[in-house]
Image (cartoon, rainbow, N blue to C red):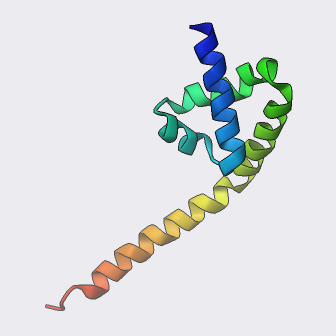
Amino acid sequence: MKGIVEERAVELGEYIVEHRATVRAAAGKFGVSKSTVHKDVAQRLKYIDPQLYRKVKAVLDYNKAQRHIRGGIATRMKYKKCADARAARPAD
């Protein structure tokens, strides 16, 4: 079981670096929880492959710094979609 966890941590790390993916995207791709991804790449990977860990940490730090911007964009798109739907309805 231990070898499988280590392999998964390395695979997750490589995926995150290669695709500049978020923890959520990596979790969806590999079919595991966000908590599992975070534990694998933030704790286990540090001891398995320190060089890969540093690369992953850089991507995750960038994603963390940008998340408030992505959240604002998502909110704006949500309300624009609602406004467009209201405008498309026929008037009474």
Q: Nearer the viewer, residue 29 or 63?
A: 29
Q: Where is residue 36 in the image (x, y as percent from the top left)?
A: 57, 25
Instruction: Quadrant for residue 60, please give it.
Output: top right
Instruction: Quadrant for residue 10, please give it.
Output: top right
Q: Which residue is drawn at 43% across and 71% down?
A: 79
Numbered label tally: 0
Q: Which of 28 and 68 is in front in this view?
A: 28
Q: Is residue 75 left or right of residue 68?
A: left
Q: From where the camera sits, is residue 39 visible?
A: no
- Quadrant containing the N terminus in the rendered view: top right
Q: Most extreme residue toward the left, as rendered?
A: 92
Q: Nearer the viewer, residue 13 or 68?
A: 13
Q: Which residue is drawn at 64% across and 21% down?
A: 7
Q: From where the camera sits, is residue 64 visible?
A: yes
Q: Residue at x 61, y 17 (%)?
A: 5
Q: Where is residue 80 in the image (x, y as percent from the top left)?
A: 43, 76
Q: Where is residue 24 in the image (x, y as percent from the top left)?
A: 55, 42
Instruction: Quadrant for residue 45, please give it.
Output: top right
Q: In this view, does 52 lie to the left or right of 82?
A: right
Q: Which residue is drawn at 84% across and 26% down?
A: 50
Q: Position of residue 73 (x, y in %)?
A: 57, 67
Q: Most extreme residue toward the bottom, as rendered?
A: 91
Q: Is residue 71 above or below residue 1?
A: below
Q: Is residue 50 above or below residue 15?
A: above
Q: In this view, does 47 lie above or below 13?
A: above
- Quadrant containing the C terminus in the rendered view: bottom left
